[in-house]
Image (tube, rainbow, N blue to C red):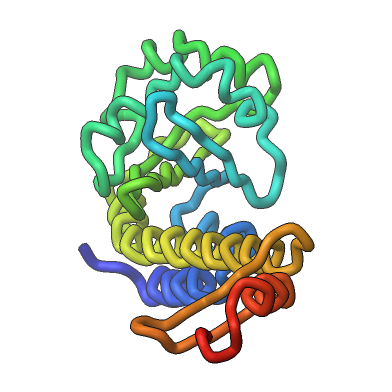
Amino acid sequence: MHFTSKELELRERIITALHSSLSLPLVLEATRAPLLELTPADHMGLCLMTPGPPLDFQWLVPGHRLTLLDEYPRWADSDFVRGPIFAQPNVVLRDTQMLARRELEESALYRRSQELDLRLEHVMAVLLPAKETLLGAFTLYRDRRVEFSEHDAALLTSLTPHLTNAIRNCRDMQTARSGARLLEELYNRPDAGCLVVLPPSRELLRSERAKVLLDKWFAPSDL
């Protein structure tokens, strides 16, 4: 599908933003303005999920707070988006492909959005399998009665590999940082000793507690 020069410019800005940080909230905030202009849409959100059961999820929503997503655990079983995107991972789907307009308006999520004065009239979403233990559901919302088009879906589809990589890279960095903090905590605990050895016998690190224990248990010639 052909993209205009303006769309290609915005797309490049989005790709640059997706690789601008290893903090997912910062990445989403940097991506928000050009992505909402490109599609165009009024709101965006990323739901990070750990496959279950139970299915664990966390919403990251840059920009304006969406109260409905704060209540998502209450309405998760009524989410008409989840089933279709889980059935077709990596495929961008519009609400018009998920259910009829009458069904959308009768859905619990739609009715609740009206009660909260959000008026989430149209949705476009894609499920991004970033890792075996991590899924990302990326969703765009319009609060006006203008359907997402095939062209809008094509634009988002062109970005899905970059979105997936951003989710994966940010989660890997989060895991590495958590591991580093855990090792630091163990290293500094007065009731634990840490000894890091590179096989077969090269010592890389010895905490102070480990040094005391080794000096107590072994003669210098044994070490």
Is residue 90 in view? yes
Q: Does the image show residue 6? A: no
Q: In the rendered image of this protein, does residue 27 appear above or below residue 81?
A: below
Left or right: 84 with respect to 79?
left
Could you tell me residue 159's position as x and y percent?
A: 36, 62
Taking the spot 66% from the left edge, 29% from the top edge, the residue there is: 70
For residue 171, side relative to residue 178 (left or right):
left
Query: Looking at the picture, how far across and down is residue 160, in whole percent?
Result: 34, 58
The percent coordinates of residue 20 (x first, y second) are 56, 76
Left or right of 99 on screen, residue 182:
right
Q: Residue at x 35, y 54 (%)?
A: 130
Q: Nearer the viewer, residue 59 or 196?
A: 196
The residue that appears at 41% across and 17% down in the rendered structure is 104
Q: Is residue 170 above or below residue 6?
A: above
Quadrant in the picture for residue 93: top left
Residue drawn at x 68%, y 73% as measured from the top left: 216
